[in-house]
């Protein structure tokens, strides 16, 4: 029986791809991932299943091909944080898959600001609304947010100001590990006036 490998590949460039992950990718027949991650591994010349427009077809695809091909599902950052692992672990028995961890965007973000994160509240807005976001931010002095293009950093700042969240440092960390990486360390008022953010995470910290 081939195992399905679910592999965290880091935030985006190969500098943060672990050797064990690379070995398993090289040992696979087919890579299942987003176009962004597959672009980093084009040189491996593996068969690809691009998730972007075929997300709903991934489970049937894995069911149909897992016995004949060595499949690797590549997720950004670490597999244990808001990844496809959640869905796959409900569909497949533990004996059928193995997880290889990766370096999370969360780890890179906190290392960039030189702080630890064991006391951070972690929230994902990626593809999901968080109705009580302002309450969470008021309740926790250090919050890490995975963002979504539908609710960009300047709108998060505007919303928090409207909800009377005060005294917060706001750090936006964009395109981490890529050549166009950008880190903006400001406050909610300044952030609410900015525009044009792409792939990013945020740290919202009490001053
Ligand atoms: C579904 S979550 C996956 C998180 C991932 N499992 C991890 O451990 O980092 C996707 C979110 O991660 C963040 N993200 C992924 N790669 C990033 C990068 N290179 N720079 C900044 N944020 C990134 C964005 O907020 C994006 O919406």
Image (cartoon, grey):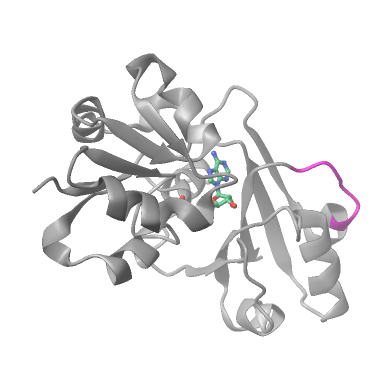
Residue at the spot 42% in from the left edge and 52% down from the top edge: 58
Q: Is residue 116 left or right of residue 124?
A: left
Quadrant position of residue 132: bottom right
Residue at the spot 76% in from the left edge and 43% down from the top edge: 197
Against 120, residue 137 (above or below) is below
User: 22 or 53: which is nearer to us?
Assistant: 53
Q: Is residue 102 left or right of residue 160?
A: left
User: 17 or 162: which is nearer to us?
Assistant: 17
Quadrant position of residue 116: bottom left
x and y, in percent, of residue 188 in the image: 80, 61
User: 173 or 35: which is nearer to us?
Assistant: 35
Q: Residue furthest right?
A: 193
Q: Quadrant of the C terminus?
A: bottom right
- Residue 102 visible in rendering: no
x and y, in percent, of residue 49 in the image: 43, 37
x and y, in percent, of residue 69 in the image: 22, 37
Quadrant position of residue 95: bottom left
Counting the numbered discs, the total is 0
Against 85, residue 197 (above or below) is above
Residue 10 is covered by the magenta coloring: no
Question: What type of secondary structure mainly makes up the magenta span?
Answer: loop
x and y, in percent, of residue 45 in the image: 35, 17
Residue at the spot 42% in from the left edge and 70% down from the top edge: 119
Q: Which residues are magenta?
A: 192-197
Residue at the spot 39% in from the left edge and 40% down from the top edge: 32
Residue 193 is covered by the magenta coloring: yes
């Amino acid at each position: 029986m081939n195992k399905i490998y679910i592999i965290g590949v880091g935030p985006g460039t190969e500098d943060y791809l672990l050797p064990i992950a690379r070995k398993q990718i090289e040992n696979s027949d087919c890579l299942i991932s987003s176009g962004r991650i597959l672009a980093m591994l084009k040189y491996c010349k593996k068969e690809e299943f691009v998730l972007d427009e075929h997300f709903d077809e991934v489970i049937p695809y894995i069911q149909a091909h897992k016995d004949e091909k060595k499949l690797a599902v590549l997720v950004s950052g670490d597999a244990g944080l808001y990844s496809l692992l959640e869905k796959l672990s409900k569909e497949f028995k533990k004996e059928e898959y193995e997880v290889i961890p990766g370096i999370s965007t969360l780890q890179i973000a906190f290392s960039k600001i030189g702080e630890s994160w064991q006391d951070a509240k972690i929230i994902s807005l990626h593809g999901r609304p968080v109705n009580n976001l302002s309450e969470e931010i008021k309740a926790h002095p250090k919050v890490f947010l995975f963002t979504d293009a539908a609710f960009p950093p300047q709108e998060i700042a505007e919303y928090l100001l409207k909800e009377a969240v005060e005294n917060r440092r706001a750090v936006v960390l964009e395109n981490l590990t890529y050549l166009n990486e950008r880190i903006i360390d400001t406050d909610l008022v300044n952030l609410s006036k900015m525009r044009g953010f792409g792939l990013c995470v945020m740290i919202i910290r009490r001053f």
